[in-house]
Amino acid sequence: MHAFYDKWNRAYNHVIRNLKEIEPDLLVFYSYPKPKAEFPTEQSLDTFIGIQAMSYNDRYFNRIHKGFGQVQDTLESYFD
């Protein structure tokens, strides 16, 4: 990853910065154990992945993309 960052950081600084922020979350899925080694059934693996997804959503629930922050009131009024 460091070679990638060094090569593209000047041209795409904002993209690289955002990638560095979410890199730990992306690497969580890379380090998942093999299904048959750690989980006896497919249901137990699904439960584990569901819990991981819910914890990710809880951490980033109040996060708003800057483009949507400007129209948040309008969007919320559509769902009221």
Image: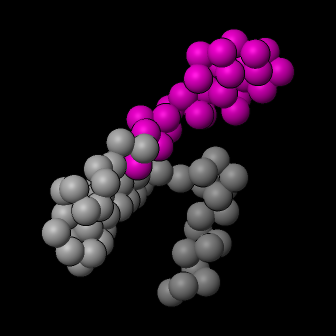
Name the colour scheme. Answer: one colour
**73 relative position to 22: left or right:** right
- Which residue corresponds to the image point at 76% horizontal and 21% vertical from the top-left? 8
Residue at 60 percent of width and 51 percent of height? 65
Whole-percent x and y of residue 40? 16, 69
Please tell me which residue is depicted at 49% across the width and 35% down the height of the picture. Answer: 23
Image quadrant in which you'd find residue 62: bottom left
Foreground: 18 or 51?
A: 51
Q: Main secondary structure of the magenta part?
A: helix
- Residue 59 visible in the snapshot: no
**Which residue extends farthest right?**
11
Question: Looking at the picture, how far across and down is residue 45, in whole percent?
Answer: 26, 67
Image location of residue 12, percent across then percent down? 78, 26
In the picture, which quadrant includes the N terminus?
Answer: top right
6 falls in the magenta region: yes
- Of residues 32 and 56, the one drawn nearer to the viewer in this rendering: 32
Q: What segment is highlighted magenta in the picture?
A: 1-29
Whether residue 30 can be seen here: yes
**Most distant residue in the front direction:** 36
Verify whether residue 52 appears in magenta.
Answer: no
